[in-house]
Amino acid sequence: MCRNIRQLHNFEPPATRDEVTAAALQYVRKVSGSSKPSQANQEAFDRAVREIAHLTQHLLDDLVTAAPPKDREVEAAKARARAEVRYAR
């Protein structure tokens, strides 16, 4: 489940709200052990995603670095190359 959580800090352009929410959703899925909560747990699940996304955005806003911002396309190409090696037959 957590393979979809990607580094969000120090990219140009910065991480979008959708990316932050997707990372929060994956985190909550992993911690809860459920990708689709029951109706009884849906409210708690959704609240956790909202709160974690909110806190994650604050974290990203507050982090500082001296490193130059990463390029999303370059990082995506590196990930594809790693996947080709990993899944090559």
Image: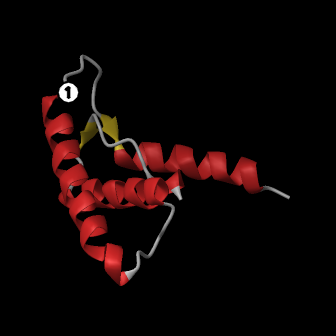
**Residue depicted at 29% across the width and 20% down the height:** 67
Display colour scheme? secondary structure
Residue 75 in the image: x percent, y percent? 45, 43
Residue 68 in the image: x percent, y percent? 28, 25
Residue 36 in the image: x percent, y percent? 44, 76
Let me know if residue 17 appears in the view: yes
Q: Quadrant of the C terminus?
A: bottom right
Is 16 situated left or right of 71 in this image? left
| Three-letter amino acid code at the position of disc 1 | Leu
Q: Nearer the viewer, residue 83 or 32?
A: 32
**Residue depicted at 27% across the width and 60% down the height:** 49
Residue 34 in the image: x percent, y percent? 48, 67
Q: Quadrant of residue 38?
A: bottom left
Q: Looking at this view, name the residue that lies furthest to the top.
A: 66
Residue carrying label 1: 63
Q: Is residue 43 above or below residue 17?
A: below
Q: Is residue 7 above or below residue 65?
A: below
Q: Secondary structure at mark 1?
A: loop
Q: Residues within 10 Å of mark 1 (few under 14, many from 20)?
A: few
Q: Looking at this view, name the residue that lies furthest to the bottom.
A: 39
**Residue depicted at 21% across the width and 63% down the height:** 47
